Image (tube, rainbow, N blue to C red):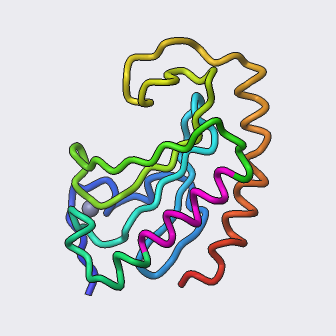
């Protein structure tokens, strides 16, 4: 039985470009000019907290999160990975996996803070050029996750 809530943007839309569609979760690429390679792991059901999941589902979600981090790290070559789960605006379980660079718009602050600088076009382009590889490697790495 699936749990969907009308009016919830993550129940009603993919929430990004879908890189992998599992039976219980999806991994999407976020369309953010400042943060190429920003991915989200979104649970399909409208549950609020990780602890609302069964132990098996929790293990699956956490496993997938590390797989996504692995691929983002390998392909995007960031200075640091930021992981976050808030759900204050959209109380539907999802995790952010964000590649961070010392010259990105907010470093070392969180990406939700006030911007400190504009990333250079060269930096953004270099990162955007990695997206085809990110799509391919993410699909490969998650291909066994149903
Ligand atoms: Zn929802």
Query: Is 94 drawn above or below residue 139 in the view shown?
Result: above
Q: How many marks?
A: 0
Ligand 1, what quadrant?
Answer: bottom left
Name the residue: 21% across, 45% down: 88
In the rendered structure, the answer to whether residue 74 lies left or right of residue 57 reads right
Q: Position of residue 5 (x, y in %)?
A: 20, 65
Is 67 magenta? The answer is yes
Q: Position of residue 85 (x, y in %)?
A: 33, 51
Q: Residue 48's image quarter?
A: bottom left
Name the residue: 49% across, 22% down: 106
Which residue is more in the foreground, 125 or 52? 52
Magenta region, main secondary structure:
helix
Which residue is more in the foreground, 144 or 12? 144
Name the residue: 51% across, 70% down: 64
Magenta residues span 61-73
Q: Position of residue 91 (x, y in %)?
A: 22, 54
Q: Residue 92's image quarter?
A: bottom left
Name the residue: 31% across, 53% down: 9
Which residue is more in the foreground, 132 or 127? 127
């Amino acid at each position: 039985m699936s749990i969907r809530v009308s009016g919830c943007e993550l129940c009603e839309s993919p929430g990004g470009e879908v890189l992998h569609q599992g039976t219980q979760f999806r991994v999407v690429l976020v369309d953010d000019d400042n943060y190429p390679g920003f991915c989200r792991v979104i649970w399909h059901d409208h549950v609020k907290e990780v602890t609302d999941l069964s132990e098996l589902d929790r293990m699956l979600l956490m496993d997938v999160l590390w797989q996504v981090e692995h691929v983002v790290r390998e392909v995007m070559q960031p200075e640091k990975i930021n992981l976050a789960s808030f759900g204050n605006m959209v109380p539907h379980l999802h995790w952010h996996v964000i590649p961070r660079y010392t010259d990105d718009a907010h470093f070392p602050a969180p990406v939700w803070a006030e911007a400190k600088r504009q990333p250079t076009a060269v930096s953004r382009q270099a990162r955007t050029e990695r997206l085809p590889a990110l799509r391919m490697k993410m699909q490969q790495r998650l291909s066994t996750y149903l």
